[in-house]
Structure formats: C-alpha cells, structure tokens
Amino acid sequence: MRFTLVIAAACLSIPLASPPAHAIGCLSGGAAGALAGHMAGHGILGALAGCIGGHAWHNHTVRQQDLQNQQEYVQRRQQFDPNYKNPWTDGQ
C-alpha cells in the first residue's frame, strides 16, 4: 500500500517539476491548419504547417510585446531621471 502511494505521488509530481510547453501558437495554428487542410484533403499536412506557422507568429508577437514594454519602461524612467540612458540601444 505504501509503495503504491509513493509511486502515485511520484507520478503526480512529474508535471509540477517539468517546464511549461509554451504551445499556444502551435495549438491554435495547428487547429486552423487542420481545418484548412481538411478542406483541401490534406488534414495532417495542414496541421503540421499550421503548427509551425502559429508557433512562429506567437514568437513574433511576444517579441513585439517585449519591445513595447522596454520602450515604455525607458520612457517612464526618463521622466523621473533625464540622465537615464536606454540599456537596449548601442548608445544612440
């Protein structure tokens, strides 16, 4: 009985120790690609292409949001300290 509980606890703790998958773009793109591929008769290929495209698009939007957050941070910092220089530029 005790051995079974230890095994069950170990199995339940594995997802807590693993990093998140970050598959948002892949799942949404794969679903859209599967639908479009199904209409064309190539559901699996459409899902794979949609996953790749959706993942790339998600990474693109995340980078844009990070850049916007950096720019807003620099603007707020410069309001309080006019001598503050942007650390993300080459000293321009």
Image (tube, rainbow, N blue to C red):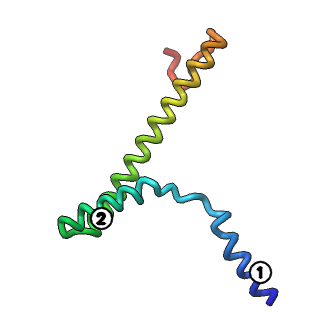
Tell me if residue 85 comes above or below residue 62 in the rendering: above
Question: Residue 28's quadrant in the figure?
Answer: bottom left
Q: Image quadrant of residue 35?
A: bottom left
Q: How far is mark 2 from mark 1, CA to CA?
A: 41 Å
Q: Does 54 appear above or below 13?
A: above
Secondary structure state at the residue bearing disc 1: helix
Q: How many labels does the image show?
A: 2
In the image, 45 versus 87, the foreground residue is 45
Classify the position of the N terminus by image quarter.
bottom right
Q: For the residue carrying disc 2, how many other residues have a C-alpha within 10 Å: few (<14), some (14-19), or many (20+)?
A: many
Residue 80 percent across, percent down from the top left: 66, 13
Q: Disc 2 marks which amino acid? A: Ala
Please tell me which residue is depicted at 32% across the width and 64% down the height of the picture.
Answer: 47
Residue 55 is left or right of residue 46, and the answer is right
Q: Nearer the viewer, residue 8 or 36?
A: 36
Which residue is depicted at the point 41% across and 59% down?
Answer: 27
> Farthest residue toward the top?
82
In this view, the residue farthest toward the left is 40
Q: Mark 2 points at which residue?
A: 34
For badge 1, the amino acid type reads Val
First along the sequence among labels 2 and 1: 1
Q: Do the residues labelled 2 and 1 touch (CB within 8 Å)?
A: no
Which SS class for mark 2? helix
Mark 1: give few (<14), some (14-19) or many (20+) Cα within 10 Å. few
Picture residue at 53% right of the left edge, 59% below the top: 21
Of tags 2 and 1, the one toward the viewer is 2
The numbered dot on residue 6 is 1
